[in-house]
Amino acid sequence: MRTSGPGARSSRHLAREARRPRCSVPGVEPERARQLLERERQRIEGLIEELRHAEADEQDEPGDLGSENLYQKEFDEGRAAGLREQLAAVERAEDRLAAGTYGISVMSGEPIPDERLEAIPAAERNVGE
């Protein structure tokens, strides 16, 4: 790279480029990422809706305060909380996609492998980070 003369890049220009958000990982097309995230959103929202219906169908009877019912209720509450967190992760991934940083680890700044994004579209980090 030339450091002086016409077409040379100043250190200030290079520093600005370094701060600019990186583009998505070359192997992950933005439209494919949108499809993956939309499919994941629909899956999670469907599971949340199933839980709501299951809770509505279950009616506590006066004598039904046994440990099995209590366990199931706590289990379902934990599952719902986990699904809400997964949905929040999808929303963060959609924000990264809009910002042009989808597919880049939020920890290291390194690309996340395509295979990982296909399996876990909302992945924020590489394995081991």
Image: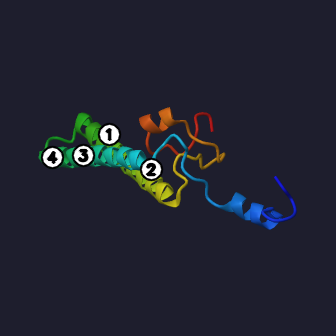
Amino acid bearing label 4: Asp
The answer to the question of whether label 3 and label 1 lie on touching residues, with beta carbons closer than 8 A, is no
Contact between marks 4 and 3 (CB within 8 A): the answer is no
Q: Can you identify the residue that label 2 sits on?
A: 30
> In the drawing, what numbered circle is on residue 60?
4
Quick check: can you spot residue 82?
no
Q: Which of the two labelled residues, at mark 4 and mark 1, occupies the earlier sequence position? A: 4
Q: Which residue is under mark 3?
A: 46
Q: Is residue 2 placed above or below 29 in the rendered structure? A: below
In 3D space, how far apart are the residues under numbered discs 4 and 3 (Cα atoms)?
24 Å
Read off the residue under disc 1: 75
Nearer mark to the viewer, of 3 and 1: 3
Tag 3: residue type?
Answer: Gly
Residue 31 x, y percent position in the rendering: 40, 49
Examine the image and state in which quarter residue 39 appears.
Answer: top left
- Rounded to the nearest angstrom, the CA distance separating label 4 from label 1 is 16 Å
Asked if residue 108 lies left or right of residue 118, the reply is: right
Whole-number angstrom distance, CA of label 3 to CA of label 2 = 24 Å
